Image (tube, rainbow, N blue to C red):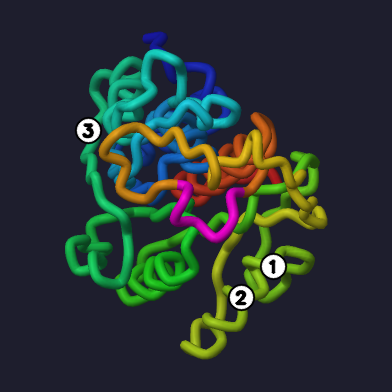
Amino acid sequence: MLNQFSRTELLLGHEGMEKLSKARVAVFGIGGVGGYTVEALARSGVGTLDLIDDDKVCLTNINRQIIATRKTVGQYKVDVAEERVHDINPDAVVHTYKMFYTPETASQFDFTQYDYVVDAIDTVTGKIELVEQANRAGTPIISCMGAGNKLNAAAFEVSDIYKTSFCPLARVMRYELRRRGIRKLKVVYSREQAMTPIDDMATSCRQNCICPPGTARKCTQRRQVPGSTAFVPAAAGLIAAGEVVKDLTGVRND
């Protein structure tokens, strides 16, 4: 019988779709990268999704975040994403956490219950903690490196963290993971050299922050607000979702 996933089943087969429907995937960070990851996982038929993000949709998110529209500004990102997932697949189970993932909040998550983890958060401390927790639980994880200040969506690659180059965030992650004895990590990273954002205070979020009321971490608290586009973070998020689907089903054509 035809359903919303029939075209995917033509490539992954019935067994592959069954694996996806029974899978539970956690996506940490529902922004420019993570939002597209959630979208693709939902459209691929993943049965259970855990969405973790404490942020609200801001007007400045509309340029790149699939959950961001004029209608959703001011709403929690995880709530908007949950609604989109259920519009795509009413049978999907969605767990939402309005939480900023840090080493201090890590104990609230049991990584053994996940079949896969996607790291789409920005902070190094949080990313390192995610990798350590996933490794302890024996849960596969893919980590997305920097997507800000870039224009070339075709420059992304999937690689092990220790084979990356160019990306400053990947360099820091390599150093920190090596110190902790973690020998491998699948990542999505870009070989493009980051651009320097135009220094224009008229369009600077640091000087003219318009974050919605109740936003926990405003732009004025950030060291730098990176430039972004509609297509670069989207590409990273879709690539990450593709790796999750291929790994969970065992179907690859690389």
Residue at 39 percent across and 75 percent down: it is: 132
Residue 234 spot, x, y in % from top left: 61, 35
Left or right: 208 as drawn, with respect to 16: right
Are dots 1 and 2 in contact, CB under 8 Å? yes
Q: What element carries label 2?
A: helix
Question: Visible in this render: residue 225?
Answer: yes
Q: Is mark 3 on a helix, strand or loop?
A: strand
In the current view of this chain or complex, which residue is farthest to the top? 2
Residue kind at label 3, given as amino acid type: Val
Which residue matches tag 3? 93
| Distance in Å between CA atoms under marks 3 and 1 | 36 Å
Residue at 23 percent across and 57 percent down: it is: 113
Camera-near label (3 vs 2) is: 2
Position of 79 relative to 168 (above/below): above
Which residue matches tag 1? 168
Q: Earlier in the sequence, mark 3 or mark 1?
A: 3
Residue kind at label 1, given as amino acid type: Pro
